[in-house]
Amino acid sequence: MTQKKFLVFVVEDDRHLQKMIVDYLTEHFPDIEINLYKTGEDALIDLKIGPDLIILDYFLSLYDKDAMDGLTVLSHIRQANKTVRVVMFTGQEDPDVAASAIKMGAFDYIVKSPESFNKLSDIITQLKKQIVNETPPFDKRLLIVLLIGIIMLSALFIFRH
C-alpha cells in the first residue's frame, strides 16, 4: 500500500511570496505535495482533495479585489472540514485579527518574517509525525464492523440452539 503524501495547500496571492514559501517547503520537505492558490475561493473548490495543512494568507485581493479575506476563507473551511489544520501565514499584525483566527479554529497564526519560516517548518514536522502515528479511520471502522458482525453471529448461534 502506497502512503499518501503530506498535502499542503498554500493560499497566497503574491507570486513572489508563493515562490518563497514553495522553495522553502520543497527544500526542507521534499516528500510533501504542494497545491498553490491565488484566492481562497479556488482553494475551497479543492478542499475535497483532503489537504493535511492549509497555509492561508489574510489579504488575498491582489489579483481579485472582490476575493474573500483569510478569515472569511477560514470560516468556509471550518464549515466544510472541522479537522484540517489551517495556519494563518500573513503580514497582518493586528492582534484582533490573530485572536479571531484562533477563535475560528486556526491551528496557528504566524506573522511573516525571516524567522516565520522556521516556525512553519516546526509545525509541518509536528503534523507529519502525528499523521504517521495515527491509525487511519478506515481501519477503525472496519474493526467495528467486524466486531458487530461477530457479536451478531454469536447471538444468532446462541439463540438458535
Image (tube, rainbow, N blue to C red):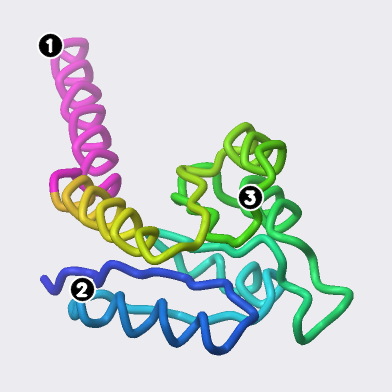
For the residue pair 143 and 50, the one nearer the viewer reads as 50
For the residue pair 146 and 100, the one nearer the viewer reads as 100
Counting residues from the start of the chain, the first of labels 2 and 3 encountered is: 2
Element on which disc 1 rests: loop
The spot of residue 19 in percent (x, y) is: 45, 87
Magenta segment boundaries in residue numbering? 133-161
The residue singled out by tag 3 in the image is 93
Q: Amino acid at mark 2?
A: Phe
Asked if the stretch drawn in magenta spans residue 149, the answer is: yes
Dot 2 and dot 1 residues touching (CB under 8 Å):
no
The spot of residue 29 in percent (x, y) is: 20, 73
Element on which disc 3 rests: loop
Q: Amino acid at mark 1?
A: His
Where is the C terminus found, in terms of image quarters?
A: top left
The residue singled out by tag 1 in the image is 161
Q: Looking at the picture, does residue 38 appear above or below residue 160? A: below
- Label 2 neighbour load within 10 Å: few <14, some 14-19, many 20+: some
What is the quadrant of residue 40 in the picture?
bottom right
Counting residues from the start of the chain, the first of labels 1 and 3 encountered is: 3
Q: In the image, what residue occupies the spot 33% across and 85% down?
A: 23
The spot of residue 104 in percent (x, y) is: 64, 37
